[in-house]
Amino acid sequence: MTNKFHLAYFLTDSHAQAWGTAWGGNIGRDWALPDLYVAAARELERACFDYVLIEDNVFVADAYGGSMDVYLRNGLSVPRRDPLMVAPYMLQATRHIGIVPTISTFAYHPYQLARLVGSLDQLSQGRAGWNVVTGSSQRALQNFGHSGMEEHDKRYDIADEFVAAANALWDSWDVDAVVADRRGGVLVDPAKVRVPDYKGEHYSTRGPLNSGPSPQGRPVMAQAGSSGRGRVFAARHADTIVVKAKTLDYARQYRKEVRELAASEGRDPDSIKLLLMIAPIIGATREEAELKRQKRDADDLAAAELTLAKVSKIVDIDFSRFPLDEPLDPTGLKTEGTRSVLADFIARNAGRTLRQAGAIALAYNPDNTNLAGTAEDVAAEMVEIMQHVGGDGFLITGQTTRHFLAEVADGLVPALQDRGVVRDRYRAGMLRENLMEF
Ligand SMILES: Cc1cc2nc3c(=O)[nH]c(=O)nc-3n(C[C@H](O)[C@H](O)[C@H](O)COP(=O)(O)O)c2cc1C
């Protein structure tokens, strides 16, 4: 008997990039409108997903070839709307699904963030979260007037404090502080509101929040720390951790480790749901799925340079400096950006040319899976993967078109529901309750 597992969706910037593809619709014209975000939220709620994680970063890259051109021409993470602005549209159009915008800590003060995400939690009756990222690009830092980026582990130390300050603010109100006692003429019970007066090395905030209590107490926190320090950060704070795993053994080991880390931080490991990122290919038949897979591989090879430009942006290394059709020499490659992506990139591509490496650089499926087939095939494989990894679910991603959303909501999810392994209706009200349901 397989335990139930959770489903979430990673809404990446591929939505703007879909403009030139077969099912890209009118996104080249409609990219600024909220419609596709709203459609995604509705479709994924129909499929009873726990949440949608909205990707973000706050800069136009020029890491590849020292120029913005490749990024602008091809719509690589630009133009993109602020997830905190998109989230209310998605929440307004739905009743159950959680919406988790990515928020860079360096771009906010904890008070401002606690107020924004707390307000979102109130307006959605407890369906808001935040995906905490600490920033990995000089360009993003420069947009906020900072001259340089702190060293990798130090960024997590600072983010620890950021989270502590935000939590202190959310905790400054009891959830039931608004008593609305007509007879006594009391709206808010002053005994249920405190001044946290948080003082840290990097952040201080007096509080309390003036926005009032959040329905979930603290909104749900998502994280994706992969490095040693990142794992500690995630295990310490996150309600849900998203992981990109090179292999299934890696995913199983990662889960075991963050659960142990959580326990050593005094947390119940079952209070953290770890979701494995996958990008399934779903066809009406196996033949169709195989054709789609071949096309994706061919497209990826043709777009290898674009993918390298994306990796350059993530790791802050200019790959245009290296010959495309020779094996990459990893000696001396170092990053203050996203270390795990660089390590994975190097490990995955031993012996491959840079072009070949680029073609598969952002492959989301673990190497030892074949997540291409009919909905039944993919569902069966997902069940096997969960048995191997141990839990707690999947973060599904792909090129976000209405076509792909329908493949997921009308094909894959019903096949999983038939197997009794995912939710077929929402039972709880708030996002954390849904995450804790099984
Ligand atoms: C599924 C997933 C989604 C992520 N989304 C974002 C994002 O939207 N913005 C961002 O700057 N980083 C994002 N990251 C990167 C992580 O925040 C983190 O930097 C990365 O996992 C590396 O962690 P490390 O620095 O501890 O190695 C994401 C990572 C994963 C696996």
Image (spheres, helix red, strand yellow):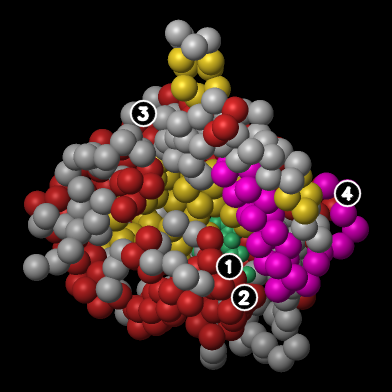
Q: CA distance from mark 4 to mark 2?
A: 26 Å
Residue located at (25% from left, 69% from top): 386
Q: Amino acid at mark 3?
A: Thr
Q: Which mark is residue 229?
A: 2
Q: Amino acid at mark 2?
A: Arg
Mark 1 = which residue? Answer: 233
Of marks 3 and 2, the one in the foreground: 2
Q: Amino acid at mark 4?
A: Gly
Q: In the image, residue 371 lies at what x, y percent?
A: 28, 66
Mark 3 or mark 1: which comes first in sequence? 3
Mark 4 = which residue? Answer: 145
Between 250 and 166, which is closer to the camera in this rendering? 166
Q: Are marks 1 and 2 in contact (CB under 8 Å)?
A: yes
Q: Residues within 10 Å of mark 2 (few under 14, many from 20)?
A: some
User: Is residue 64 left or right of 97 when viewed as pictured?
Assistant: right
Between 176 and 430, which is closer to the camera in this rendering? 176
Mark 4 or mark 1: which comes first in sequence? 4
Q: Is residue 128 above or below residue 350?
A: above
**Label 2 beta carbon less than 8 Å to ligand 1:** yes
* Residue that sits furthest to the front in the current view: 184
**How many numbered circles does the render carry?**
4
Q: Which mark is residue 94?
A: 3
Residue located at (53% from left, 15% from top): 186
